[in-house]
Image: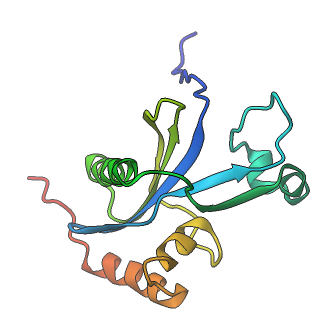
Amino acid sequence: MGTGALCEEYIEGRELTVGVLGNKRVEISPVWELFMDDLPAGVANIATSRVKWDPEYQRKIGLRTGPAEDLDAATVERIRRTARRIHRAVGLSGYSRIDMRMDSDGQVWILEANPNPDLCFGEDFAESFERLGYGYPELLQKILNLGLRYEAPWMG
């Protein structure tokens, strides 16, 4: 075709996100999950633009997010460790969100390393770090401080 192409395979499973906060030393948020409680049978649970931005559709499918449910401690630690490694491997700093899907066998697949997740009050990133004791103003201040202290790697 003469152009670049991206091929993806749909993986049935749970949509998970993990926030990462830090430069050299990082903090990892609790594992967060996207739930679509009233999604019609046969419809894939993919966070499409309609799922993300259409409030009426969100109500219809029972969209909500919150702490991942029913994950054992070993799985949580594996997911958090993976998020830390991805954040570092792609050279992210300050803050990021790692989006994952976990299939029915417990295999975790990386969907995206998001270097600029939504920081709005009440959104997943802020809510997940609230569980670690960061109030919203403190979280924003932490991100600003990380930016001010960031030192780009020397390229020489």
Residue 92 appears at what percent x and percent y?
33, 57
Of residues 53 and 1, the one drawn nearer to the viewer in this rendering: 53
Where 109 sits versus 2, above or below?
below
Q: How is the image coloured?
A: rainbow
Residue at 54% across, 31% down? 104
Q: Give x and y (percent) for residue 48.
A: 72, 42
- For the point 57% across and 22% down, the residue is 9
* Image location of residue 149, percent across then percent down: 25, 79
Which residue appears at 77% of the width and 49% of the height?
51
Along the line of sight, which residue is nearer the eye, 79 or 110? 79
**The N terminus: image quadrant:** top right
Q: Quadrant of residue 63?
A: bottom right
- Residue 132 position (above or below residue 11): below
Seen from the viewer's position, the closer of residues 15 and 136 is 15
**Left or right: 35 as drawn, with respect to 85:** right
Q: Residue at x 48, y 29 (%)?
A: 105
Left of 3 or right of it: where is 92?
left
Could you say where residue 67 lies in the image, as x and y percent from the top left?
A: 56, 62
Left or right: 66 as drawn, with respect to 23:
right
